[in-house]
Image: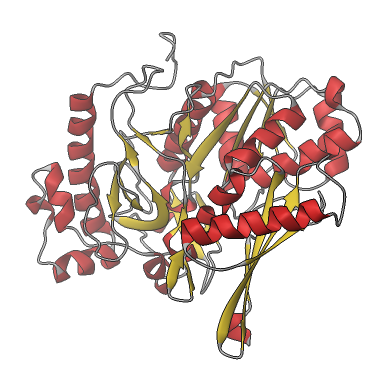
Amino acid sequence: MSDTARFIPSLSADEISALQLSGLKWTVAHAFEGSPFYRARLAEKGLAPGDIKDLSDITKLPFTTAQDLQTGYPLPLLSVPEERVVRIHGSSGTTGKRKILTYTQKDIDDWAGMFARCYEMAGLTVLDRVQICVGYGLWTAGAGFQLGCERFGAMALPVGPGMLDIQLQMLTDLGATCLCSTASMALLLGEEVEKQNLRGKLKLKRSIFGAEAHTRKMRQRFEEALGLEHSFDISGMTEIYGPGAGIECEAHEGIHYWADMYILEIIDPVTLLPVAPGELGEMVITSLKKEASPLIRYRTRDMTRLIPGLCPCGCGMPRHERIQGRSDDMIIFRGVNIYPGQVAAVLEKHAELNSEYQIELSRVDGLDHMVVRVEKRPGVAVSGCACDDALATAVAEDIRNQILVRSKVEVLEPGSLPRSFAKTKRVIDSRDKD
């Protein structure tokens, strides 16, 4: 990491631990005093703020879930007087009511500072032009990317999602050097750049993307199409301010997360016990400075693992692997637990295939069936030839050997599957409707 870092603090492991203990004590006391929800939840455990004396005491604290936020609608977790709230943001979730989170001005300032760290980690300068292609409004994405860009000092181009013609116009006419979007949007833009032969008119060097699980092949595809030097996976969610909770560095060996702002635990989503170091599990977050809506052991449902050791870049902030999927995205198919990312990992190994895929689940006469649709890479073979059948058979065999389920694989022409400006829907499950 550069010695001239303006936003990323240089902290040792001991300094981070001291900040985490201080922040944990403050958060528990603040939530106990200001939030009826947290006061009742801690009382159920027989806990008071004074019981937190060491970082290991975090395991005594109760978990908070998305259901808690939905049950407490419209202002769950509120821990300050309402007159101190300057903004709300919302996350839709998959079921139930929207999750609404509140922000004080200090929360907004802290968020902007966290996100400025992300731009710094990605190697941007104040001369960069940052095209922001994510949603604005209730969703935190657009506001977060813009807040961080302005705090960092680069030029923000707040285009928002969709509107391919305007996106391409801004990329070419204003010479955006950094693209901020979902991986699906970056892929869609890359394909359109190739169709219109615009590559030579772009000044893009870097992209920052997030909000959905992605494959390495998908990432390589949009990097090549857009002519990028680097792309950076960013983490975050509305519950922990928004995007900007962590980001990759140029070493691309995991996501550095801001451990002075929150504690990250990895637990088994079934037993709720900590997993062994380096094992895959569910990310649990406890905020250390959030005022309006503090988090105490919030179950994110995101699956990842911690990466031990110091990063080659020299940054002392700890790392976790990119998000592998969500614990509640798990598919139970003929008694086998499957994550979509496992299927994607099998597809990645076949050079003839593109990054786009879709899984369809159905039930016929009481028996579950799986169809995996995947696109060929542009320029591979011709439509309907025996090569496609052989490739489909080989992929199906790999899925059976590696994931232990039978599936039908359909190899499609490039561009056959739906594209998205936001998160691409990978799984279509009609079994409950049958």
Asked whether 352 or 271 is in front, the reply is 352
Q: Residue furthest toward the right?
A: 196
Residue 76, percent across and down?
Answer: 40, 64
Residue 99, percent across and down?
Answer: 48, 63
Q: How is the image coloured?
A: secondary structure
Q: Position of 157 compared to 125: left or right? A: right
Residue 163, percent across and down?
Answer: 83, 46
Q: Position of 131 compared to 322: left or right? A: right
Q: Residue at x 22, y 26 (%)?
A: 13
Quadrant location of the N terminus in the rendered image = top left
Q: Position of 290 compared to 188: left or right? A: left
Please say if 239 is above or below 96.
above
Q: Residue at x 41, y 52 (%)?
A: 303
Residue 352 in sight? yes
Asked whether 364 or 146 is in front, the reply is 364
Q: Residue furthest toward the top?
A: 3
Q: How many marks?
A: 0
Quadrant location of the C terminus in the rendered image = bottom right
Q: Position of 187 compared to 17: left or right? A: right
Please say if 190 is above or below 427.
above
Quarter holding residue 69: bottom left
Residue 89 in sight? no
Q: Residue furthest toward the bottom?
A: 365
Residue 375, percent across and down?
Answer: 75, 51
Quarter holding residue 166: top right
Q: Residue at x 54, y 36 (%)?
A: 233
Please say if 39 is above or below 318.
below
Please say if 167 is above or below 323.
above
Asked whether 416 or 350 is in front, the reply is 350
